């Protein structure tokens, strides 16, 4: 038996999908808000999204010097889109029904109440294992 047998892939617990109703404006025939299905992202997926949402900002007073800046709104939108299983935010028919062309635009059109969107953001961050919000980390880094 390997000294690492407990760490082998077959011992890794699979994370279950979760359900959450992000908006009260989409309801079933009984008036209950529709629940969306969410999946857990991998650390690799998260890193790819964060890299995609990071830009280089010139440092004032230092020519040719740059610092990375994560575009937090874009990052959160992409993280939510990557987490959603149902509804399929990539579905062309669904996008067309809202007059949008990307999954991120569809997300914002479907959850168009700022308070509900904020709650969805908090849910997804918690679901993905972030114990403090991304915005909290941004504020902490500023201080």
Image (cartoon, helix red, strand yellow):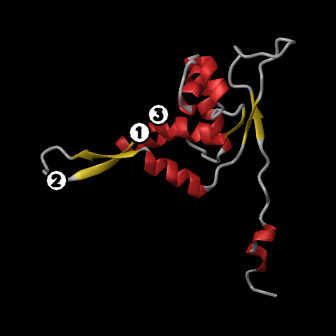
Between 99 and 54, the residue placed more toward the observer is 99
With 28 as the anchor, is 103 left or right in this view?
Answer: left
Front-most of residues 97 and 140? 97
Query: Where residue 55 sits in the image (x, y, percent)?
Result: 34, 45
Q: Which residue is mark 2?
A: 64
Q: Residue furthest right?
A: 30
> Which disc is residue 71 wearing?
1
SS category of the residue bearing label 2: loop
Pointers 1 and 3 in contact (C-beta within 8 Å): yes
User: In this rendering, is residue 75 above or below 26?
Assistant: below
Real-space CA distance between mark 3 and mark 2, rounded to the nearest whole angstrom: 27 Å
Q: Is residue 143 above or below residue 22?
A: below
Identified at 41% across, 39% down, the residue is 71
Residue 108 placement: quadrant:
top right
- Which label's residue is closer to the chain start, 3 or 2? 2
> Residue at position x 60%, y 37% from top?
80
Q: How many marks can you see?
A: 3
Q: Which residue is mark 3?
A: 73
Residue 125: image x %, image y %?
A: 61, 40
Give the label on residue 126, or none. none
**Circles 3 and 2: CB distance less than 8 Å?**
no
Disc 1 and disc 2 in contact, CB within 8 angstroms? no
Q: Is residue 87 left or right of residue 53?
A: right
Q: CA distance from mark 1 to mark 2?
A: 21 Å
Element marked by disc 3: helix
- At mark 1, the secondary structure is loop
* Residue located 58% across and 26% down the image: 106
């Amino acid at each position: 038996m390997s000294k690492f047998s407990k760490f082998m892939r077959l011992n890794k617990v699979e994370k279950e999908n979760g359900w959450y109703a992000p908006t009260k404006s989409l309801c079933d025939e009984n008036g209950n808000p529709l629940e969306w299905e969410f999946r857990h992202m991998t650390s690799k997926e998260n890193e790819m999204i964060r890299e995609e949402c990071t830009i280089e900002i010139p440092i004032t007073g230092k020519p040719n010097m740059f610092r990375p800046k994560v575009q937090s709104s874009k990052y959160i939108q992409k993280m939510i889109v990557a987490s959603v299983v149902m509804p399929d935010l990539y579905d062309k028919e669904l996008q067309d029904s809202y007059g949008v062309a990307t999954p991120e635009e569809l997300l914002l059109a479907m959850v168009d109440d700022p308070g509900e969107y904020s709650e969805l953001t908090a849910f997804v961050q918690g679901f993905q294992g972030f114990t403090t919000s991304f915005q909290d980390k941004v504020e902490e880094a500023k201080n």
